[in-house]
Image: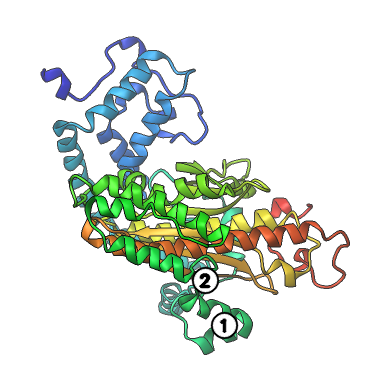
Amino acid sequence: MDDIFKEPRLKSSKFFDYKCPNILGIHKFFTEEPASKWCLETFVNRLICEETELSFEQVQELFLANLDQINNQMNVCTPIRAFCSSYIDWMQTWKGQAVSNACNEYFQECATLKTNLKHKRKHKEIAEDLVSENAKYTAFQSIFQRPQRGISQTPTTPNKRMIEHEKVKRYVESIQIICAFGINTSELENLVGKDLADEISSYRDRIPSVWTENLEKYFDNALDKTGKNFKLAIQEEIEGGEESVNKFRLYCEKVLMEFFNLVDVFPTLSRTIKERKFTIYHISPLFMFYESTFGTLEFDWIETHARSAKIVKTPTDSGIVLVDVKGIRVSDDKEIWHMEVSGPPSNPTTRHTVYDTKKTLHTDILNLVDILRNHLDLDVNIAKKIKVFSMQVIAYRLTLYALSMLEDGQFVAYELASAELPFDFDSRSKYMAIMRMMAIFHDEVVQQKAIMDKIDRILIPCKGKNVRSVLRVPENLRDI
């Protein structure tokens, strides 16, 4: 029985010097270090020496994800794959958790010791490049107060590769993005114009097309019920409703039934779960049933490749970026939506949330560029109606965002709706806000499909200001 709790090691010396081949996206630790040294402690030490910006949770997830990726490679020899599988399972035992906690403490101590020295060295180098010795203070201030309209780098989250190539950084820094969050109306009008400012402001009070009086009565009736009566009430149909409203009610029924099946025996759900379980249990039904009900989007799950990130691929960088979930429009096979879950519901870290926010904006831009580059001769007045969407989950709150291009080539990101997930049956009324958010999402998806259909009918290129004249694209796309 003791063998179960021992940290796994390769049993045959024949494979001690084994180094993983260059699998796409694999961390260089596994290609440079022999398999005899593959363990969490050595991996943590390696990343500490590299002065990683990742948190310990991100480092551990990166390590386990790479082991899982190696385990799934059929061209890797069986003993190595068996070791990877055993190590992943061992990390779930109490002994594995104890080692993880010890590594975490060591990681935090090293991070604390290095933080001040690292910041001083970094700021000194920047200042010396920009100004003379007497002006260093001014340089520091300008760095600390960098405006939020520009994205400074391609962000990363656990097991999401950071794109570090200088051309990519210059491209992202050259893009101007207006984040219309918490900006008053007059300031927003100055930034994006009155029409778009009014549209953004209207989302707070927006009534989706499928949100009828009968649908609201359906919710009021169902959410007032308990036990089996709740289950029966959510199956009741809306009489005399339009086809679109009835289909949305069917979607709501599926989601609410899934929720009821989670709380029918134990009415309170655990909040101390990890990110992946949280995603699968609480969030996935909203999109799984959207796909099966409307058939306009297909969703790919859990650290899936963002295809648009290949736009910034270089000879020295694969361009791989992984997102938690992505939505692909069936009609044109374009990724128009993605989601980032910023950690577990009960303990989202500030660092994880910040990096997810930056990466969300970066991925949104590339998704939109991927669409616009197929319509470079399109009038910008039409192109600015094209949107892509994202959702960020922080703790229990889901927030839906949209991003579009302005006439001058800048991008604007703004919030569409926000809602909180319930974790017990008594909080089921929170589904009213969730379904309103999904109704807004549905309206936007339908409208975008209509816009793209209209664009496909335009045969004569625009003679005025077109996408080609304003869109800022990566260097390797300029010849398209």
Please tell me whether residue 405 is drawn above or below residue 57 in the rendered image.
below
Q: State which tag comes first along the sequence, 1 or 2.
A: 2
- The label shown at residue 435 is none
Q: Position of residue 185 (x, y in %)?
A: 51, 86
The residue wearing badge 2 is: 130
Q: Nearer the viewer, mark 1 or mark 2?
A: 1
Within 10 Å of the Cα at label 1, are there few (<14), some (14-19), or many (20+) other Cα atoms? some
Q: Position of residue 257 (x, y in %)?
A: 34, 48
Confirm whether residue 107 shows in the render.
Answer: yes
Q: Position of residue 203 (x, y in %)?
A: 50, 75
- Identify the image's colour scheme: rainbow, by chain, secondary structure or one colour: rainbow
Q: Is residue 385 left or right of residue 480?
A: left
Quarter of the view holding residue 467? bottom right
Quarter of the view holding residue 176? bottom right
Please tell me whether residue 89 is drawn above or below residue 369 in the rendered image.
above
Confirm whether residue 121 shows in the render.
Answer: no
Q: Nearer the viewer, residue 222 or 77?
A: 222
Q: Residue furthest front?
A: 239
For image coordinates 39% across by 14% down, the residue present is 78
Q: Amino acid at mark 1?
A: Asp
Within 10 Å of the Cα at label 2, are there few (<14), some (14-19), or many (20+) other Cα atoms? few
Please tell me whether residue 261 is drawn above or below residue 348 in the rendered image.
above
Quarter of the image that includes the N terminus: top left
Instruction: Give the distance between the C-alpha atoms of the residues marked 1 and 2, in whole angstroms.
Output: 41 Å
Element under label 1?
helix
For image coordinates 28% across by 55% down, the residue present is 230
Q: Nearer the viewer, residue 451 or 164?
A: 451
Please tell me whether residue 47 is drawn above or below residue 459 in the rendered image.
above
Q: Amino acid at mark 2?
A: Leu
- The label shown at residue 198 is 1
Element under label 2?
helix
